[in-house]
């Protein structure tokens, strides 16, 4: 193919669909990026000639494996495990591990693809990867979770390493699971290295890693609001999810003087018109992390709050700002219209790809402040990158220094989005800005390496 004959966007998407049958999440993530990158590449023959986007949208490798474990009743259970190593042009593969029954190869491929751009945006040397299993930790005993994690790592260990691929947590994988997996890695290899992040503080973890994703999403929101001379203070926030990202996003909103009205889980959402205070957030953290309970229990503890079940999401509650912090495709076109009709002025995604393509197009057309997860939730992986640096140097940085670094990184990502996403008339398309800034860094590294 000569340089003038490169494919157009519809043909490119068509090819992605054909090569990835039955993988709608992956096709969705690639489409969203390609919409912006094709425009950016116009006239830039070097990226077309080297087939850069085509190569980023083809994972370096997808490792798929069987995970057998024994439940408390002595039954043998079989799960499927994966690690998708998408791209290591700018550093070792890096990205979380998700344990959830909805995990498929498509979901992990979309997450590893998104992670490649996100990690580039942080400015730290990290490539993109993601892993996980369709294992459902809900209702399992701690011993069952431990046995599963050990079995998962017994296969995964041969594919990862501190300079190769560094996994971390994601949905269903928090400090407890990272502990079990790190323990098994250390046992098999007899090495104590920074092979996982999100570790406990006693065994190589970094301060503020737990808080970083949620806090970072609110810092990104703060940066967006400030372009309009506004602050988080006094704003009513609607948040979905009630896990790591949601509870820490809520905490930072409260610290900055905002009011949090909702939280959710897969069964439904709670609405607390009095506001979810720090004390209530601490109660939710305990409910989720220690008691492993359901968000519906909130209304028994805090009078005046209501629970809406049936898997309902909170987007119909009137708000100034919205932070989707649960999972992919939890906010569709109708939800986007409802948020806009209720006066929502800003959306900062804590989750990965929570807004479907129709929703993204509606937010873009309305020109509100809308941050895609790959920009606004990058604080978590950024502090993971800082955990890797501390592990390599065998030191631990102080909390105040790390807080400053997180603030600085989120400000830097905002600036990168503004550089490539401004229309010159005061509107910033953060989706476009994030896609182009992330792409450019990875693409230029790939060009340097030639055809590999
Ligand atoms: P947690 O497991 O701590 O919490 C997940 C929350 O989302 C729970 O409230 C869970 O409810 C809800 N949820 C999960 N799946 C679904 C579903 N299919 N439908 C409705 N609700 C669901 O995970 P995190 O908080 O770590 O992750 C949340 C999001 O943030 C994910 O998209 C993740 O990829 C993203 N993210 C996480 C980072 C991190 O550092 N942890 C970094 C960057 C992004 P239930 O208990 O009922 O399952
Ligand atoms: O989606 C994400 O960025 C994460 N789950 C965190 C990844 C990491 O390596 O810290």
Image (cartoon, grey):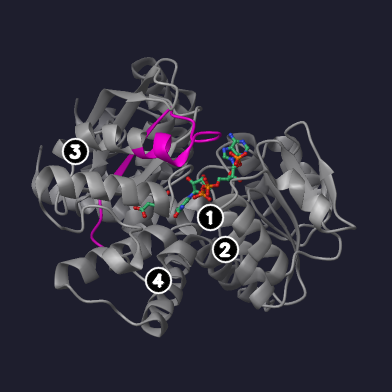
Q: CA distance from mark 4 to mark 3?
A: 30 Å
Report the span colored magenta.
Answer: 124-146
Q: Are marks 4 and 2 in contact (CB under 8 Å)?
A: no
User: At numbered mark 2, what does the secondary structure look like: helix, strand or loop?
Assistant: helix
Asked if residue 258 lies left or right of residue 439, the reply is right
Asked if residue 201 lies left or right of residue 47, the reply is right
| Mark 1 C-beta to ligand 1 under 8 Å | yes
Q: Are marks 4 and 3 in contact (CB under 8 Å)?
A: no
Residue for point 27% across, 76% down: 396
Callout 4 crowding tier (Cα within 10 Å): few <14, some 14–19, many ≥20:
many
Q: Quadrant of residue 379?
A: bottom left
User: At numbered mark 3, what does the secondary structure look like: helix, strand or loop?
Assistant: loop
Q: Is residue 85 above or below residue 314?
A: above
Q: Are marks 1 and 2 in contact (CB under 8 Å)?
A: yes
Q: Nearer the viewer, mark 4 or mark 3?
A: 4
Q: CA distance from mark 4 to mark 2?
A: 18 Å
Mark 1 or mark 4, which is nearer the start of the sequence? Answer: 1
What residue is pinned by disc 1?
244
Q: Is residue 82 above or below residue 190?
A: above
Disc ID at residue 248:
2
Mark 3 or mark 2, which is nearer the start of the sequence? Answer: 3
Disc ID at residue 409:
4
What residue is pinned by disc 3?
50
Question: Horizontal and vertical percent for residue 248?
Answer: 57, 63
Callout 1 crowding tier (Cα within 10 Å): few <14, some 14–19, many ≥20:
many
Instruction: Name the quarter where the C terminus is drawn.
Output: top left
Question: Horizontal and vertical percent for residue 27?
Answer: 44, 28
Q: Quadrant of residue 91?
A: bottom left
| Mark 3 C-beta to ligand 2 under 8 Å | no
Which is nearer the eye, 174 or 449?
174
């Amino acid at each position: 193919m000569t340089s003038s004959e490169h494919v157009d966007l519809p043909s490119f998407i068509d090819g992605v669909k054909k090569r990835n049958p039955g993988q709608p999440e992956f096709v969705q993530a690639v489409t969203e990026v390609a919409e912006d990158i094709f425009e950016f590449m116009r006239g830039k023959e070097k990226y077309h000639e080297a087939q850069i986007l085509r190569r980023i949208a083809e994972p370096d490798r997808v490792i798929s494996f069987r995970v057998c474990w024994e439940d408390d009743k002595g039954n043998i259970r079989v799960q499927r495990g994966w690690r998708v190593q998408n791209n290591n042009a700018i550093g070792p593969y890096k990205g979380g591990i998700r344990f959830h029954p909805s995990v498929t190869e498509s979901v992990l491929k979309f997450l590893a693809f998104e992670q490649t751009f996100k990690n580039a945006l942080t400015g730290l040397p990290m490539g993109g990867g993601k892993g996980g299993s369709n294992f459902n930790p809900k209702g399992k005993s701690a011993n069952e979770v431990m046995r599963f994690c050990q079995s998962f790592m017994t296969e995964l260990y041969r594919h990862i390493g501190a300079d190769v691929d560094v996994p971390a947590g994601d949905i269903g994988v928090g400090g407890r699971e990272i502990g079990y997996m790190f323990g098994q890695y250390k046992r098999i290899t007899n090495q104590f290295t920074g092979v996982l992040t999100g570790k406990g503080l006693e065994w190589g973890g970094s301060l503020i890693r737990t808080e970083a994703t949620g806090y970072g999403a609110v810092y990104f929101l703060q940066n967006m609001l400030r372009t309009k001379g506004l602050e988080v203070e006094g704003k009513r926030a609607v948040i979905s999810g009630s896990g790591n990202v949601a509870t820490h996003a809520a905490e930072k909103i409260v610290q900055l003087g905002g009011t949090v009205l909702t939280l959710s889980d897969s069964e439904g959402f709670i609405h607390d018109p009095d506001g979810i205070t720090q004390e209530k957030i601490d109660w939710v953290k305990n409910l989720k992390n220690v008691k492993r309970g359901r968000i519906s229990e909130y209304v028994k503890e805090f009078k005046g709050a209501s629970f809406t079940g049936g898997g309902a999401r909170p987007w119909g509650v009137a708000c100034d700002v919205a932070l989707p912090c649960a999972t992919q495709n939890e906010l569709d076109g109708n939800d986007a219209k409802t948020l806009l009709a209720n006066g929502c002025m800003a959306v900062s995604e804590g989750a990965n790809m929570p807004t479907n393509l129709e929703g993204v197009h509606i937010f873009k057309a309305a020109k509100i402040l809308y941050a895609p997860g790959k920009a606004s939730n990058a604080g978590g992986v950024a502090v993971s990158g800082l955990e890797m640096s501390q592990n390599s140097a065998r030191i631990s940085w102080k909390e105040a220094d790390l807080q400053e670094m997180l603030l600085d990184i989120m400000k830097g990502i905002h600036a990168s989005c503004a550089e490539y996403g401004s229309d010159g008339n005061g509107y910033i398309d953060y989706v476009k800005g994030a896609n182009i800034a992330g792409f450019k860094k990875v693409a230029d590294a790939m060009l340097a390496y030639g055809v590999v």
